Image: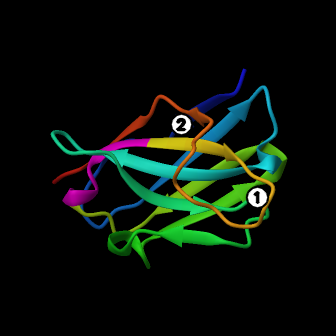
Amino acid sequence: QLQLVESGGGLVQPGGSLRLSCLASGFSLDNYAISWFRQAPGKEREAVSCISRSGGFTNYRESVKGRFTISRDRAKNTVILQMNSLKPEDTAVYYCAARFRSDSICTYNAINSWGKGTLVTVSS
């Protein structure tokens, strides 16, 4: 059973930072591209960032470029989303998702497994 568990969400003031983790259990993330999505209240889910199997390919939505960084911690079977300079519009439930891949890119479709999400609230 593929299981992903997100952690690291919380309440932070504008301009602050949070570090989200996506931990896999029951399988190795080495064969999966990992994506982060978010869904704000009353809005549709949107893609935020993804990372390839090797970590050599990453992608970010325009509004988070320069502020968010995605990375892999293979020893911990975890993918990290470091979020800096947070804005109120970053408030959302953040989900990680895994897609089995045999190539060296990442995309946001054909997801094999989703986590249950972690809430990020940016407010003063």
Residue 7 visible to the viewer: yes
Span shown in magenta: 88-94
Q: Is residue 32 left or right of residue 28?
A: left
Residue at disc 1, secondary structure: loop
Please, is residue 19 above or below residue 14 in the view?
above
Image coords of residue 21 (percent x, y): 58, 45
Q: Which residue is mark 2?
A: 6
The amino acid at mark 1 is: Arg
Image coords of residue 66 (percent x, y): 44, 79
Tell me which numbered mark, 1 or 2, is placed earlier along the sequence: 2
Alpha carbon separation for disc pair 1 and 2? 19 Å
Q: Is residue 38 left or right of residue 7?
A: left
Q: Looking at this rendering, what residue extends furthest in the bottom direction?
A: 66
Residue depicted at x 40% and y 69%: 61
Crowd band around label 1 with a 10 angstrom C-alpha radius: few (<14), some (14–19), many (20+): many
Please, is residue 42 above or below residue 53 in the view?
above
Image coords of residue 94 (percent x, y): 41, 44
Image coords of residue 81 (percent x, y): 54, 57
Is label 1 or label 2 in front? 1
The amino acid at mark 2 is: Glu
Residue depicted at x 60% and y 54%: 80
Residue nearer the viewer, 79 or 106: 106
Can you tell which mark lies on residue 92? none
Q: Which residue is mark 1?
A: 53
Residue nearer the viewer, 110 or 50: 110
